[in-house]
Amino acid sequence: MSKKKLKNITPQNYLKYYYDIPHEGKTSAGKPLRKLKDITCPYRGIKIIPTDTIKGFEKNLDRCKTAKDGVELLSAYQKNMLPTEKAMFAIFKDFALINPDDNLQNCLKMIKMNCLTRLKLEEMEVLDDVDRLTRKLSPQTALKIRAKTTKCRQIIISNSTHDTFKRKTFLSSLEEIIPNENEREILNDIKNKALFLPTSESSRNAFVVKYSKRSQTEIIRRIFIASTGSIEHVTPASLGGMNTIGNFLLTSASGNRYRENMPLPEYIKRHPKIPQYMQMYIDDIIREIHNGNLPGNETYPYKIKKKLFEESGGRIVISLSAYKYSEEEAAGAGVNVSIS
C-alpha cells in the first residue's frame, strides 16, 4: 500500500477499502460502539480487534517482506482469529519454519490444486441441497432453478480458466425467478440455502483458492481484517432495517460479511452458539456502560435485546440481570448525559 493511501486510512473507512463492507455514512450512528474495546463478537465468539490498532498494523505490515515477517506480525492477533483464519495461520506458521525467506503467496500456490478440488465438492453439496428443495415447487419453477444449478455444475467441473463459478452471480440469478404466490416461502428457503455456498470466510479451501492470486500483503491484511470491528444491521438495511444504534451490533468483519442478508434464524442454524455469544456480547456492553464508555446510550441493552428477540423469532433471549439500570433509569441516564 502506498504511503499516500495509508494516510487516508481511518478506522471508519478501513473495511470499505479492503473488505467491501459499508462502514461509514449509513452506519454513523454506530460510532459509539466502534470505540469500545474487549468486546465479544456476537456472531462468532472471538474478541474483536479494536479499530484503533489499524494504523499501527498497517505500518508494521509495510515492513513485512518474508513469510517469517508475516507470521510474526499475525502472531499478536492469534487469539482473535476466527476458525478459517486460525487454520490458515497454522499452515503459514509451518511454512515459515521451513521457508522463512519465502512469501505466503507461494505457500498458497503450493496447496491450491488440492484445495480447489475440495472446494468444488463443497459447492456441489450446497447445489444438491438447493435442488432437493426444488421438489416442493411447481415443475415450471423447479425447472428454472435446476437450469441454473446445472449451469453452475458445468462451470465447477470444467477446467476452464476463463469461465469460473461465481457465488454472487448464482445468488443474483435466483432473484430473477418469479414464483407463484404459494411458492414464495419455498423460494426464500432456497435463497437462504444458497447463501451457504463456501466463501473465504467459511471455507479454508475457498480462502486458499482466492488468495493464492493475491500478494503476501493482501493475505496478511485479510486475516487481520476478519476480526476487526464492523457495524452490523440486525434487521438488514435492504429489508428495511433502520440506521439507528438500536438496530446495530458491533461484530467482527467476517461475521458481518458472511451473514449478508441471511435471516437471523438461518444464521443461527449455521452457528448454533450465536445465542450464547449474544449474551457474552451484551455482558461486555454492560461492563463498558458501567465504566462510562457508552455515554448517552444507556438504553442500548434494552433496545438491542428487544430487536434480537424479534429478529431471531424468539431464539435469542438476552438476560440483563447484570445491568444496574432499569429501563426507566437507563432512559433518564441518557437524557442527563446529553444535557450536560
Image (cartoon, rainbow, N blue to C red):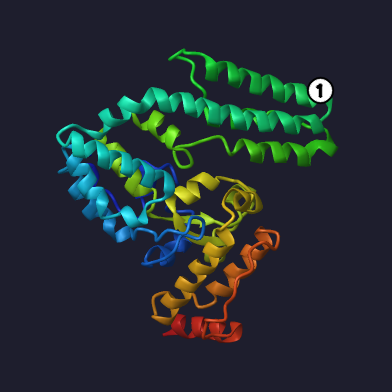
Residue 42 image offset from top left, x and y in percent:
50, 60
Relative to residue 105, is residue 75 depicted above or below?
below
Give the quarter of the image for residue 303: bottom right
Residue 35 image offset from top left, x and y in percent:
37, 66
Seen in the image, is 200 located left or right of residue 88? right
Residue shown at the point (52%, 82%) measured from the top left: 323
Relative to residue 52, is residue 73 depicted above or below?
above
Q: Is residue 295 visible?
A: no
| Viewer-closest of 243 and 261 | 261
Number of numbered discs on residues? 1
Residue shown at the point (56%, 66%) measured from the top left: 246
| Viewer-closest of 47 and 56 | 47
Seen in the image, is 81 located left or right of residue 297? left
| Viewer-closest of 247 and 154 | 154
Residue shown at the point (26%, 39%) measured from the top left: 94
- The C terminus is located in which quarter? bottom left
| Viewer-closest of 138 and 44 | 44
Residue shown at the point (32%, 43%) measured from the top left: 90
Residue 225 image offset from top left, x and y in percent:
35, 48
Residue 1 image offset from top left, x and y in percent:
23, 39
Seen in the image, is 190 located left or right of residue 294? right
Say few, some or many: other residues with alpha carbon within 10 Å of mark 1 (under 14 / 14 to 19 / 20 or more): few
Q: Mark 1 points at which residue?
A: 140
Give the quarter of the image for residue 103: top left
Relative to residue 303, is residue 16 depicted above or below?
above
Q: Is mark 1 on a helix, strand or loop?
A: helix
Which amino acid lies under the numbered mark 1 shown in the image of this protein? Answer: Gln
